[in-house]
Structures are given as structure tokens and as C-alpha cells.
Amino acid sequence: MKIGLFIPCYVDALYPEVGVAAYKLLRHLGVDVTYPMNQTCCGQPMANAGFEHKAVPLAERYDAMFGGFDYVVAPSASCAAFVRLNYPRLLKGKHTCEAAGRTMDICEFLHDVLHVKSLPGKFPHKVSLHNSCHGVRELGLSSPSERHVPKFNKIKDLLSLVDGVTVCEPERVDECCGFGGMFSVEEPAVSARMGADKLARHIATGAEYITGPDSSCLMHLEGVARRQGKDIKFIHVVQILAAGL
């Protein structure tokens, strides 16, 4: 099984430690993983801003770069969801877009493909899990609270394999944090208020850390926390899963 590691642009620029943790974890699990050089943005910001045509060349580049892999894995539910759900439409009639159909968030890949049952590290801390909108409602990482379906959470399943970690969830478990990509730029006041409300619910759990599958959501919440002077830390879920490596 050959895996292409896709590191979204904001992870590469702001949270490179998340990309390193993803690579180390996949290697530890015996995966043949490659990080193709000259990666670019997936095009989600352009598309969300209403300029889908500007995302098309990036989609074509992505398909050409990752077309030879069995799976493409990314430590970002948001970007993985954009690629898998939107590239086939953006490239319709131009490419088969095989890489998009094989693109997965790393938590989804570990849970559904590798069926990971044990992890080596320890993380003796209480964490509050942030279930990001794309992960819940587009990738199915957890059950949406608005639907009457049996409850599940693939991220919690994976975190339960880490020795010492205590996982809790906030009230309104999968309510949006307010980031929403371009939404936070176009509606900053609403975005900030949503972020403040979500942060307060996470803090109310008594957790030391807030974790989740999207650095973008964590970045937004951390920005709110810093402005408010709140003493809570943030860590991507893959960093916990790779603890000790």
C-alpha cells in the first residue's frame, strides 16, 4: 500500500509539527508513505470565496501529483473533505480525478483502513475534543447530533488507544466554532462570538487541552483564547496519537 501524504498549506506554514507527527505515525504503523514535493493549496479558500475557476488548476495539479498512490492522507478533515467531495465536480470532463476519491483524513484512514488497535505513546492529560464541521458532516468522523443515528466517534476511538489520556466533549458537542474559512473574514463579529461561545464550553469541561482534526478550527479557538487570556492549550489530535514517537 503506497500512501501520499498531503500537508495543507496552513499546516505547512503555521503548524509544521502536525505534518511531522503525521509522517512519523504512519511510518511507525508500517505504512509506505511519501511526501511529494512542490505541493500547493487544495484550492478551498478560492472556491469558498466564490472563485471556483481558480481552484481548478490546483485540482488538476493535485490529481497529477497524487494519482499514483493507493491513498492520499491529510491531517486535515476540512481539506480532505474539500478534495474528495468537490474535485470530481470541478474537474468533470477534464480528468478522472482518481486521487480525490482516495483522499482521506488521517483519523479516518487510521480507523477505517488500517483498523489501528494499539498506539505506543502516553499522554497523561485531560483533553476536550473539538468535532469540526467538515469531519462530522462530510467525512463521517462522528455522528451528527442533529440526526437520530447511533452515536459513534472515530477520533474518540483512536484517542482511547493512547495511555493516560482522558477525553471529554463540550456541551453542544458538534456546534461550529465560527471559523468557517472565508466566513471568519466576511463575518468577523459573528465568527468571534461563535468562537467565544465554543471556547467557553470547552473550558467548562475542565480540560487542559483542546484537540481536534483541523488545525484551522484550533487556530481560531486559540486566537480567541489568547485575546481573552485563557489558560488552555491546543494540540492537533495526530500529535496525541503520535506521542512518544
Image: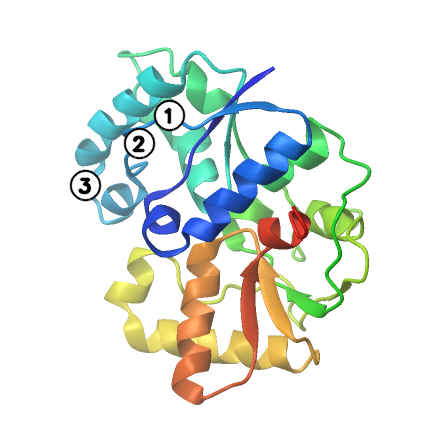
What is the three-letter code of the residue carrying label 1?
Pro
For label 3, the residue is: 51
Q: Residues within 10 Å of mark 2 (few under 14, many from 20)?
A: some
Alpha carbon separation for disc pair 1 and 2: 7 Å
Circle 2 or circle 3, nearest the eye:
2
Alpha carbon separation for disc pair 2 and 3: 20 Å
Q: For the N terminus, which image quadrant?
A: top right
What is the three-letter code of the residue carrying label 3?
Phe
Looking at the picture, how far across and down is residue 162, in whole percent?
Answer: 77, 52
For label 1, the residue is: 36
**Residue 147 vs residue 16, the one in the foreground:** 16
Looking at the picture, how far across and down is residue 184, in whole percent?
Answer: 32, 65
Q: Is residue 84 in sight in this rendering?
A: yes
Q: What element does badge 2 sit on?
A: loop
For label 2, the residue is: 39
Q: Is residue 103 left or right of residue 41?
A: right
**Residue 239 vs residue 244, the one in the foreground:** 244
Q: Earlier in the sequence, mark 1 or mark 3?
A: 1
CB-based contact (under 8 Å), mark 1 and mark 2: yes
Looking at the picture, how far across and down is residue 139, in whole percent?
Answer: 57, 39
